[in-house]
Image (cartoon, helix red, strand yellow):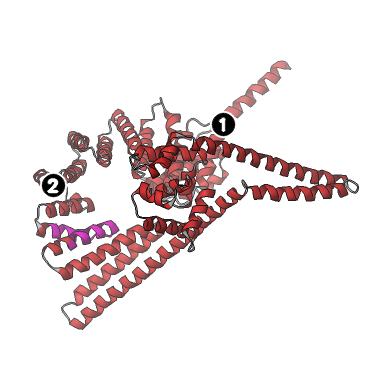
């Protein structure tokens, strides 16, 4: 009997093991193999499995969801939601799945990158890298660090971007992926450009070109070459830039925006205006707002050099229009709308060109139509800008309301209000004790809560008072106070920084709270710091080297900007004292 029971247990364990390690369906495995080289085919195959996958175990369904995210990403389909991703993440996190969790974290980073949430994306990339550290999945590691590098770079965090790109290069080297190495070397060069280190930039661009030559990849050689050309122009080594530009061998690259922009810039710098104008006009053919902006600016400068004021004004107007558009576009929908408008304008210009030889009247109608379109677009753009400003002001006033609420909850008026409530509760307690025990306990709890709140506020007030006493005895406080009456005392930049630090310590992050309400300028911040230590207008004028009228005007404008209504300079002073 014991042997029979043992046999049943063994069979049960074997069955469980077999179920747990059930292989994924063949179609799902096939889709996985197609993802990198044929992502569109993988997407099609996965779509066909949409209904049948519902009958599979949860592990298979989750892997199917991960593959769908992966395939869409490789097919350059922009992620618009994180709902499917979160299900996959929770599943693999709950099971601490060492095999699939790193990849799930990586694609979480890709999803949040598309959703414009860079901090969240970087967090997931870092989690993926930490899980893979010390392993052999170099292919995933290289793309993780490449993506991290790009996110850091476009947020101007260049030191971190440099570290990420160098790690990506290391993994590409371990994989002997020459193309990936060239791309990383170019990114490292771009980062050194952002850090104004031209020598290092030149070294990495040249290294990228040499690497591309080693693998005999003409497209990568041209990519490195165009980067070198741009750098030579920046260094004003125009002969080297021209020689580098002429080395480009790829017809496709010659017709790219970057090549046309670099060529136009170079020829303008060496005053070959006809060649520059040709490339700027080539840029106008691209359906790209940045290309349009660059082209119109260049053509305006060329027209100005040729004293063609009419053409210069026309291109300058268009340049300003594109510049405003770039500033106001904040999401993909705006970009698509602008591209559609540009395509419409392009068709209108083509139609106008076809009809130009027929009669002058139709030509004027075409130009009039374009003018109306631009006028309409300018009106829409201005309306969108006004809407954005109103929304910004609403958010600002909400922050201000919260600040004032916090100020009130630390004030004596707040304590007095609570005391009145406590007195009312005590009166109610006398009555309720004789009637209903549960009501009595509730009132007693409310009273004790108010007493605790008052006690905390009073402790905070005492602590604040001690901090202020210590601050007024500090060297930096006395230096600024003395500098008002003694012209021999020189206030240096380090003194301003020390004053800011001391005020932040005394008044609980005063400057950051002020910035959260409104992004004040450097001189406005200095005025606020001096107001906080109660230096008068004359003293502020002297210490900031500004006229009294400027100080008065600045205080008045600050109140209007933060409160959304006209106010007096003294009202701003009171606000700063209370902050």
Image depth: mark 2 or mark 1 in front: 2
Residue 432 as seen in the image, left or right of residue 96 = right
Location of residue 375 with respect to 548 vertically, above or below? below
Observer-nearest of 544 and 335: 544
Q: What residue occupies the far front of the structure in this picture? A: 485
Give the number of marks: 2
Q: CA distance from mark 2 to mark 1?
A: 60 Å
x then y, percent, for residue 292? 25, 60
First in sequence, mark 2 or 1: give its number. Answer: 1
Whether residue 393 is visible here, answered yes or no, is yes
Q: Which residue is mark 1?
A: 20
Q: Residue at x 46, y 58 (%)?
A: 569
Front one among 388 and 530: 530
Relative image position of residue 23 (x, y in whole percent): 50, 34
Above or below, 160 relative to 237: above
Give the residue at mark 2. 245
Secondary element at image label 2: helix
The 10 Å Cα crowd at callout 2, few under 14, some 14 to 19, many 20 or more, is many
Q: Are marks 2 and 1 in contact (CB under 8 Å)?
A: no
**In percent of the image, x 18 and y 82: which residue is there?**
360
Image spot of residue 489 (x, y percent): 35, 39
Residue 24 can be seen in this image: no
Q: Is residue 291 magenta?
A: yes
Q: Specify the segment rendered in magenta.
A: 276-300
């Amino acid at each position: 009997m014991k042997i029979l029971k043992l046999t049943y247990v063994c069979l049960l364990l074997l069955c469980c093991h077999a179920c747990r390690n059930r292989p994924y369906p063949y179609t799902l495995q096939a889709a996985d193999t197609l993802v990198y080289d044929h992502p569109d085919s993988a997407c099609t195959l996965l779509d066909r499995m949409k209904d049948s996958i519902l009958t599979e175990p949860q592990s298979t369904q989750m892997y199917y969801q991960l593959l769908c995210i992966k395939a869409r990403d490789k097919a350059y389909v922009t992620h618009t939601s994180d709902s499917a991703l979160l299900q996959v993440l929770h599943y693999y996190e709950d099971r601490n799945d060492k095999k699939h969790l790193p990849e799930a974290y990586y694609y979480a980073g890709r999803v949040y990158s598309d959703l414009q949430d860079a901090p969240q994306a970087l967090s997931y990339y870092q989690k993926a890298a930490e899980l893979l550290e010390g392993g052999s999945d170099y292919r995933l590691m290289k793309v993780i660090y490449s993506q991290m590098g790009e996110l850091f770079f476009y947020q101007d965090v260049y030191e971190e971007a440099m570290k990420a790109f160098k790690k990506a290069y290391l993994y590409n080297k371990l994989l002997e992926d020459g193309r990936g190495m060239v791309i990383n070397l170019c990114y490292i060069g771009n980062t050194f450009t952002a850090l104004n280190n031209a020598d290092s930039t030149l070294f990495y661009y040249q290294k990228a070109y040499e690497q591309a030559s080693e693998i005999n990849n003409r497209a990568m050689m041209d990519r490195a070459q165009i980067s070198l050309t741009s750098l030579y122009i920046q260094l004003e080594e125009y002969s080297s830039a021209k020689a580098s530009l002429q080395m480009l061998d790829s017809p496709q690259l010659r017709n790219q925006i970057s090549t046309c922009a670099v060529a136009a810039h170079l020829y303008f710098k060496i005053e070959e205006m006809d060649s520059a104008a040709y490339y700027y006009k080539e840029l106008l053919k691209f359906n790209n707002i940045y290309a349009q902006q660059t082209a119109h600016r260049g053509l305006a400068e060329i027209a100005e050099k040729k004293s063609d004021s009419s053409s210069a004004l026309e291109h300058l107007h268009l340049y300003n229009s594109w510049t405003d558009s770039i500033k106001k576009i904040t999401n993909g929908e705006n970009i698509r709308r602008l591209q559609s408008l540009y395509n419409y304008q392009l068709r209108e210009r083509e139609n106008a060109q076809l009809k130009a030889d027929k009669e002058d009247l139709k030509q004027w109608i075409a130009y009039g139509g374009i003018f109306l379109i631009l006028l309409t677009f300018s009106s829409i753009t201005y309306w969108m800008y006004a809407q954005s400003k109103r929304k910004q002001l609403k958010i600002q006033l909400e922050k201000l309301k919260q600040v004032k609420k916090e100020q009130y909850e630390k004030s004596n008026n707040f304590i007095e209000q609570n005391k009145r409530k406590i007195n009312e509760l005590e009166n109610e307690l006398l009555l309720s004790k004789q009637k209903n025990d549960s009501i009595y306990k509730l009132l007693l709890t409310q009273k004790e809560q108010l007493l605790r709140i008052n006690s905390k506020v009073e402790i905070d007030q005492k602590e604040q008072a001690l901090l202020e006493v210590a601050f007024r005895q500090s060297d930096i406080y006395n230096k600024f106070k003395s500098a008002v009456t003694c012209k021999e005392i020189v206030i240096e930049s380090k003194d301003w920084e020390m004053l800011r630090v001391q005020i932040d310590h005394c008044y609980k992050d005063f400057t950051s709270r002020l910035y959260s309400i409104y992004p004040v300028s450097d001189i406005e911040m200095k005025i606020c710091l001096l107001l906080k230590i109660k230096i008068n207008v004359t003293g502020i004028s002297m210490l900031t080297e500004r006229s009294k009228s400027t100080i008065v005007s600045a205080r008045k404008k600050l109140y209007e900007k933060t409160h959304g209504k006209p106010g007096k300079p003294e009202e701003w002073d009171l606000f700063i004292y209370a902050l």
